[in-house]
Amino acid sequence: DAGVIQSPRHEVTEMGQEVTLRCKPISGHDYLFWYRQTMMRGLELLIYFNNNVPIDDSGMPEDRFSAKMPNASFSTLKIQPSEPRDSAVYFCASSPVTPPNSPLHFGNGTRLTVT
Amino acid sequence: AQSVSQHNHHVILSEAASLELGCNYSYGGTVNLFWYVQYPGQHLQLLLKYFSGDPLVKGIKGFEAEFIKSKFSFNLRKPSVQWSDTAEYFCASRGSYNTDKLIFGTGTRLQVFP
């Protein structure tokens, strides 16, 4: 079991550019979550999927953010256009069942810096 | 809105000192509470959880947490910390309106010096 795989590990981009973060959940996990970690706000849930279907995107900050899960083994989080305030660590996590009944399995995160 | 509060943002201790990290949650029906830990350069992992029953929960690496309903608290404790406990600790609560969601606190950074 390779765990949740995120890429890239680090991303530095200029304001206005498009950024795409990628996540491969653990095989067989039906739930996938995107979190953002900042010093000020801690871990914020952005969006989550169940069986590839977006269930709750109320945490997505604004229309510049979008997420997709075209199949059970891949998800993307896209920011277009990016802004300096988007700088954060973005985590993907997966779970085989609804999270309170099973621990969340986190990836190593993508550290995004927007200059 | 449902929330989880961690009042200690940064804690510095010497080895063998006792640890208590505070966590308060806003009430929202059935309470499921968690502590996750993030060691430097690593991903978050589950430390312990409370669903029901004995309010004193034992976790890995000698950690424990006590659920006190009257205080809406779920503080994390360890009698004697080690340098290897240096990490960031996150308290989390299951969402009451959407039970698939975990609501995390802002985290507490613990530094333990030898």
Image (cartoon, coloured by chain):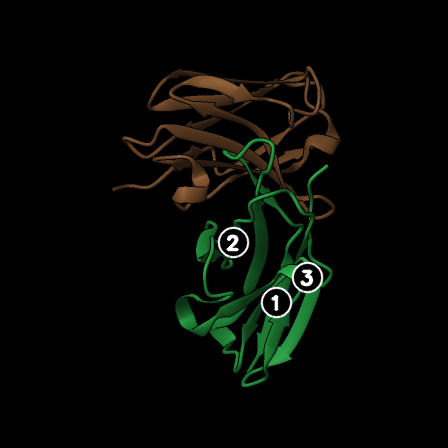
User: Mark 2 belongs to which subunit?
Assistant: B
Kindly identify the amino acid type of the residue bearing the numbered disc 2: Phe
Q: Label 2's element?
A: strand
Labels 3 and 1 share a subunit: yes
Q: Answer whether labels 3 and 1 touch (C-beta < 8 Å).
A: no
Residue B73 locus on image (x, y percent): 65, 61
Q: Secondary structure at mark 1?
A: strand
Visual hue assigned to chain B? green
Q: Residue at x 54, y 86 (%)?
A: B16
Checking the image for residue B34, the label placed there is 2
Kind of residue sitting beneath label 1 = Leu
Q: CA distance from mark 3 to mark 1?
A: 27 Å
Q: Give the mark nearest the N terminus, 2 or 3.
A: 2
Amino acid type for the residue under numbered disc 3:
Ser
Name the mark on residue A46: none
Disc 2 with disc 3 on a shared chain: yes
Judged left or right of residue A27, residue A80 is: right
The location of residue A64, given as percent across then percent down, is 67, 17
- Residue at 66% x, 74% y is B12
Q: Which residue is mark 3?
A: B70
Q: Which mark is residue B110?
A: 1
Q: Chain of mark 1?
A: B
Q: Residues within 10 Å of mark 2 (few under 14, many from 20)?
A: many
The answer to whether residue A49 is seen in the rendering is yes
Sooner in the amino-acid sequence: mark 1 or mark 2: 2
Q: CA distance from mark 1 to mark 2?
A: 17 Å
